[in-house]
Image (tube, grey):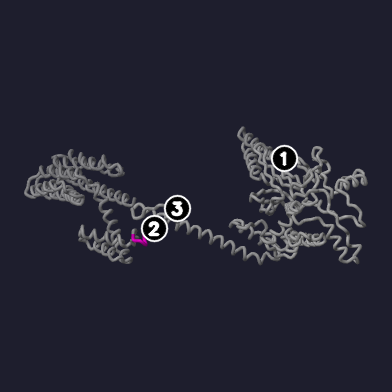
């Protein structure tokens, strides 16, 4: 680039184009790498707290994070020129993004909580393709945004090397080349004036067309943009300021000196814009009218352009100072802000001292409420859509409707049409319950009151009656479950052990009572061996055999022994058999019981039995008393095991 183009900042990181001047060239703020710096601080602190190789390694990791952040920041740049804005981020895996100022559609600023603490902010620009280039973590971000707006406005205006007025007094106007040469000769080492705008690129001189302002080679015979045959020759015009008294003759001379624009593209373009857009502004409407007139004079064109430029300048001044009418808290909100953005704006409004902040706060609150309602409506819409899809899937599985579309909305329309034609029938939930209850009542014919009440409640479809009946049914099922859990542990082998013990006991004694008991025990054994016996019957048989074995037969034996001679040996064998029975039925089988105390009493009963045998025939009644005490002790041991079984059953019922 020629040194004649003045740069306001360094050109590092960019190759300037022809006529391009660098305005801003800054590195991003450290705050852009706050996550990496925080992790580096975390590793360094942990490493200093931990001694040894691990601590040193963590400190090295933290230092490496700081070094990589430093190098990444040095390699990253934000560059703003008079033609474009460029962003380069990263060290090794860098990314570059740029946008031309003449294609920008919007410029916005934002400053978060952490950025605001350090006086930093973000400037976001959006181009014509709706792509956003965000310049994050820069100081004086409002000044940067103002610079971008000014450069965008200057870029959007046509070239300044337009028509040049003829000097007064009939002097011949100079061409741009001669003006540039004369200016250089007059000023010595000063650069050429801005009006000439001569640009040099590898020895080829380029000038702006005086008709449309486009840069073209100075050797071109016509302008490729507007078609002007003499792009560097200004039109001649007579100055009417010194000869106002000439009247219409001067006006005719001025009109005759104007170039012929009847077939110029500007005339057709202005006419088309006026017809299509129909501008409301007076300056815009007058400009279109003047440019569409092929016979207009120069004075009218200058007046219309002057008014249009003034209106544009006033509009630009109003746009460059939005903080005068809009609170700072609303800066950065787009056309469709999210709930988080609205909440952030509300917090900034609460902290703002802008006079319109308090009046704007209810509007933001209402916007937050509407956003929440919109999210809720979207959730409801998704739920309804899922319900419609479920209904359509059920109709398709049932064969009621053959869907031809896959879209949920189209399938819903097909289902509605099928229902209207009668091809598909949507049954109410109560219809299936009533038919099922009637079928069960007809097939099973329940006898209990609870079952009949439950079926009647379903048939009548009464909600209160259904609730009461279902509650009673659930309560009955709970009781049945408890009962079954209590009796389900009784098996045929448990009953067989009781029966065998009774037959052995009854076989050693004589008498009619014992014979009748033996017959009853055989009947119980036969009932237990039947194939259709249920759990309740098994439980009853077991309890009856237990009563005979532990209560009735021992009492009968004691009553018989009081009137006869005491058989110490037989009583001792009975005690030993009972001890062995308790060991077989409980100690060696029930692993879920605590046998410490029962085994102590079993040892005590065994000791009493041995003492009775030693007393023998010398003291038969004392030996019988010892054996009776051992029998009572065994009764208590068996009762203790039964209670323990009941506790275990309760624990099982409670889960």
- Pick the front one: 137 or 515: 137
For mark 3, give the secondary structure: loop
Q: Residue 25: x percent and y percent?
A: 75, 44
The residue carrying mark 3 is: 407
Percent across and percent down for residue 245 are 91, 66
Residue 499, position as x, y percentages in the image: 15, 44
Dividing the picture into quadrants, the one containing residue 37 is top right
Tell me the residue that label 2 is attached to.
415
Is 206 placed left or right of 564 in the picture? right
Which badge, 1 or 2, is on the more N-terminal residue?
1
Q: Quadrant of residue 363?
A: bottom right
Residue found at x 26% / y 39%: 588
User: Which residue is at the front of the view, 291 or 203?
Assistant: 291
Decide: few, some or many residues near mark 2? Use Cα within 10 Å; few <14, some 14-19, many ≥20.
many
Magenta part of the protein: which range? 414-422
Secondary structure at numbered mark 2: helix
**Sequence order check, earlier mark of 3 and 1:** 1
């Amino acid at each position: 680039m020629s040194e004649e183009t003045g740069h306001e900042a360094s050109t590092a990181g960019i190759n300037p184009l022809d006529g391009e001047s660098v305005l801003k060239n800054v590195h991003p703020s450290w705050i852009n790498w706050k996550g990496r710096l925080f992790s580096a601080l975390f590793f360094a602190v942990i490493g200093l707290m931990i001694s040894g190789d691990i601590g040193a390694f963590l400190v090295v990791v933290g230092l490496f994070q700081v070094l990589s952040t430093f190098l990444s920041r040095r390699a990253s740049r934000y560059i703003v020129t008079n033609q474009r804005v460029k962003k380069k981020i990263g060290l090794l895996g860098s990314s570059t993004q740029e946008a031309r100022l003449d294609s920008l559609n919007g410029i916005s600023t934002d400053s978060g909580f952490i950025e605001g603490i350090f006086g930093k902010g973000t400037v976001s620009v959006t181009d014509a393709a709706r792509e956003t280039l965000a310049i994050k973590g820069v100081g004086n971000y409002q000044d940067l945004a103002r610079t971008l707006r000014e450069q965008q406005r200057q870029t959007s205006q046509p070239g300044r090397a337009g028509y040049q007025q003829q000097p007064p007094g009939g002097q011949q106007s100079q061409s741009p080349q001669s003006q540039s040469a004369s200016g250089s000769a007059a000023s010595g080492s000063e650069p050429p004036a801005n009006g000439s705008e001569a640009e040099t690129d590898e020895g080829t001189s380029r000038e702006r067309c005086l008709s449309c302002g486009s840069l073209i080679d100075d050797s071109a015979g016509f302008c490729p943009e507007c078609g002007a045959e003499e792009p560097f020759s200004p039109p001649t015009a007579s100055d009417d300021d010194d000869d106002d008294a000439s009247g219409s003759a001067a006006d005719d001379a001025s009109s005759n000196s104007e170039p012929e624009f009847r077939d110029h593209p500007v005339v057709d373009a202005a006419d088309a814009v006026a017809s299509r857009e129909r501008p409301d502004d007076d300056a815009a409407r007058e400009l279109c009218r003047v440019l569409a007139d092929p016979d207009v004079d120069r004075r009218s064109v200058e007046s219309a352009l002057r008014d249009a430029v003034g209106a544009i300048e006033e509009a630009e001044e109003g746009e460059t100072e939005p903080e005068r009418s809009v609170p700072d808290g609303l800066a950065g909100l787009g056309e469709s802000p999210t709930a988080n953005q609205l909440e952030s704006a509300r917090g900034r409004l609460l902290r703002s001292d802008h006079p319109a902040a308090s009046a704007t706060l209810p509007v933001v609150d209402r916007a937050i409420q509407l956003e929440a309602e919109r999210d809720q409506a979207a959730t409801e819409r998704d739920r309804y859509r899922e319900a419609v899809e479920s209904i359509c899937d059920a109709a398709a599985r049932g064969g009621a409707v053959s869907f031809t579309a896959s879209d949920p909305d189209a399938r819903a329309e097909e289902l509605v049409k099928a229902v209207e034609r009668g091809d598909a029938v949507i049954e109410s939930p109560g219809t299936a319950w009533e038919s099922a209850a009637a079928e069960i009542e007809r097939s099973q014919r329940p006898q209990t009151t609870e079952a009949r009440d439950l079926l009647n409640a379903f048939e009548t479809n009464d909600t209160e009656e259904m609730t009461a009946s279902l509650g009673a049914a659930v309560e009955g099922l709970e009781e049945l479950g408890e009962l079954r859990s209590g009796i389900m542990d009784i098996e045929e082998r448990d009953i067989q052990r009781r029966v065998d013990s009774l037959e052995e006991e009854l076989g050693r004694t004589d008498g009619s009572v014992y014979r009748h008991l033996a017959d009853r025990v055989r009947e119980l054994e036969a009932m237990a061996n039947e194939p259709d016996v249920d759990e309740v019957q098994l439980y009853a048989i077991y309890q009856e055999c237990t009563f005979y074995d532990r209560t009735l037969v021992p009492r009968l034996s004691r009553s018989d022994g009081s009137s006869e001679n005491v058989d110490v040996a037989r009583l001792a064998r009975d005690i030993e058999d009972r001890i062995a029975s308790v060991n077989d039925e409980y100690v060696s089988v029930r692993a879920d019981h605590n046998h410490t105390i029962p085994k102590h009493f079993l040892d005590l009963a065994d000791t009493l039995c041995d003492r009775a045998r030693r007393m023998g025939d010398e003291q038969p009644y004392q030996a019988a008393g010892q054996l009776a005490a051992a029998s009572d002790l065994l009764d208590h041991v068996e009762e203790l095991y039964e209670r323990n079984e009941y506790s275990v059953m309760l624990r099982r019922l409670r889960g």
